[in-house]
Image (tube, grey):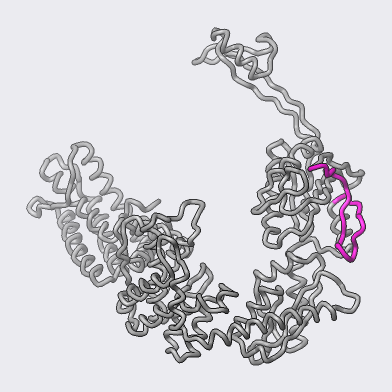
Amino acid sequence: MPELLLELFSEEIPARFQRRAARDLKKATTNALVDNGLSYESAAAFATPRRLALTITDIPARSPDTRVEKKGPRVDAPDKAIAGFLRGAGLASINDAQIKTDPKKGRFYVAIIEKKGTDAIAILAKILPEIIASFPWAKPMRWGDGRTQWVRPLRAISATFGTENDEVEIIPFAIEGLQSAQTTYGHRFMAPDPIKVRRFNDYAQALTKAKVVLDLDRRMEIIKTDAEHLAFAQGLSVIEDNGLLEEVAGLVEWPVVMMGKFDTSYLELPEEVIITTIKANQKCFCLRDGHSGKLASRFVLTANIEASDGGKTIIAGNERVIAARLSDAMFFYKNDLAIALEQRLPKLDEMVFHKKLGTQAERVERLVELAAKIAPMVGADVEDTNRAALLAKADLVSEMVFEFPELQGLMGRYYALAQGEKPEIAEAIEMHYKPNGPGDVVPTQPVSIAVALADKLDMLVGFWAIDEKPTGSRDPFALRRAALGVIRIILENNLSFPLELEEDLLGFFHERLKVSLRDTGARHDLVDAVLSGNSNDLLAISERVGALSALLGKDSGQSLLAGYRRGVNIVAAEEKKHATSYQGEVNPALLTMLEEKALAGAIDVTRTLVDELIAADNYQGAIEALSQLRQPVDIFFEAVLVNDPDEATRENRLNLLASLRDTMHLVADFSKIDG
């Protein structure tokens, strides 16, 4: 069956857009094919700096014929309704319609609409320009006098369709005067001549010969493997950076990996400064000594050409630029070390945090006050916490952080250690920003925990106060990340840390906690069961979910849940029937059967035990204590008729079941559990 080959050849596509663009092109085209009645076997999309390519196999040569019955009005309907039916069905006369009979609806008109299939090439010629015109680039542009938007100016379009054994056809369409054809181009410098393309296999092979590796993942593999081989030969290892690897692979069509070096004197800089400088300015990988693990004065670069001199000029150029950048970094570092962090604090008055929340200096004042309150709750030294909070933002006005904002906190730690601050204080300056994402580390040292919690809670409370809350599509101040950071710090450090927050913000934490717990495998219904509107101890919530999951993982837990549901359903039905409410106030004198007496006694003992265990923050024990109700509940339902003919006995037994419900609700709302 025929195969589609599409290539959109352009000026350089930014590396950060390439993978998403290939995915979007594949999705948009396959969806459009299916919407137009064309099936397919497989689809694959590719991206390089100069092209997006797509291949879709086993597309039928034309869409199938269709036959649709369109139901119309009754035969005795008004003329206006019949005329509208004829227009909608495309019929010239009512005589072209059929009449059908339904036992309930009587006789009515039916139009049989038969539609011939369409050639696949005609469908593709229609949908491909539409896909290109509406392509979801994050930052599109227009060029020349045209109206079409693309990430960079389009230079050629290849679009072919045909079977393996036949000559392919060009899918005819044009974009801003650029006519589709079957011509592409190889590497800009090493193979710039036009290449005639037919099908994907020919196309991919021709590009390889023309010094273009079409597959982004393959380019990443080449760079990674060649870099590791070069490093190994020198007794070094490459510092892994998958983000940089994908970016570099998106900058080259024919990766050629080389190694350069810089003066060892620059190793006096903090290694993060060296790595950041080389990565940010030259997109190069840094290396470590294979034995000591220390940073080496070497780097790996990726060129986009096989140079005639073996890359000597390229290496020399990169070495020259990197030397200049590291020299600048050394200058910033020495200047920063000459000024103590505390002396930088007045400059924070000139740095606005948010126009409604004041300057960074005002924020530091809030951090110091809040961190001091948190410190005793997490076992941190108050004096050290105050000092760390005071200095936490001082590096924001340093020269190094001005040049590399991603080094905030880290440089503060280096500068704090250099001026003789305690290690705990220096660590807190770095760690108070963390975790900065789901894969980031969490502070574990008490002073770091106190300042990190203060930083995130101040941010959340502040933005809530000025009504700058996240929406479904917008979170410009990363408040979701801040809330998840608070949650991770609390849970991963096993902190009992009640959040005294206003209801709306506490509800936001509940939603983030649900996400966090579900990501760890917790059932959503169990999370809902233990959450209430005023639940403010996140660790307690997490522990309850875990304990509840363990209980329900046993046969005894499932049996107890079944008994709970049976009892609750009976109570709810009777409350509705008699328009009353049963509060669980049991009269012992009305308990006549041994089985109901046993259940009442078990409930009293369990309630007392659960209250004690919850007061001791032993949620595992509290939930496990419920399991002792299973047997008396089962026996009760086997032997006791709840709706006894005697009214007083019936009400007492309903109150007994309400008491069972209320006791179980001390630890979780079992009515919210699925299954």
Residue placed most toward the observer, 606 or 284: 284
Rendering quarter of residue 420: bottom left
Question: Does residue 407 lie above or below 150 as drawn?
Answer: below
Q: Residue at x 48, y 89 (%)?
A: 417
Rendering quarter of residue 1: top right
Residue 407 is inside the magenta segment: no
Q: Residue at x 61, y 16 (%)?
A: 85
Residue range of the region highlighted in magenta in the rendering: 176-199
Residue 119 visible to the viewer = yes
Residue placed most toward the observer, 86 or 593: 86
Residue placed most toward the observer, 300 or 37: 300
Q: Main secondary structure of the magenta part?
A: loop
Q: How many marks?
A: 0
Point out residue 211 in the picture as x, y percentages from the top left corner: 86, 65
Residue 558 visible to the viewer = no
Q: Residue at x 34, y 58 (%)?
A: 531
Residue 195 is inside the magenta segment: yes
Q: Residue at x 76, y 88 (%)?
A: 234
Point out residue 355 in the picture as x, y percentages from the top left corner: 44, 61
* Residue that sits furthest to the left in the current view: 589
Point out residue 74 in the picture as x, y percentages from the top left corner: 55, 12
Point out residue 295 in the picture as x, y percentages from the top left corner: 65, 87
Residue placed most toward the observer, 154 or 37: 154
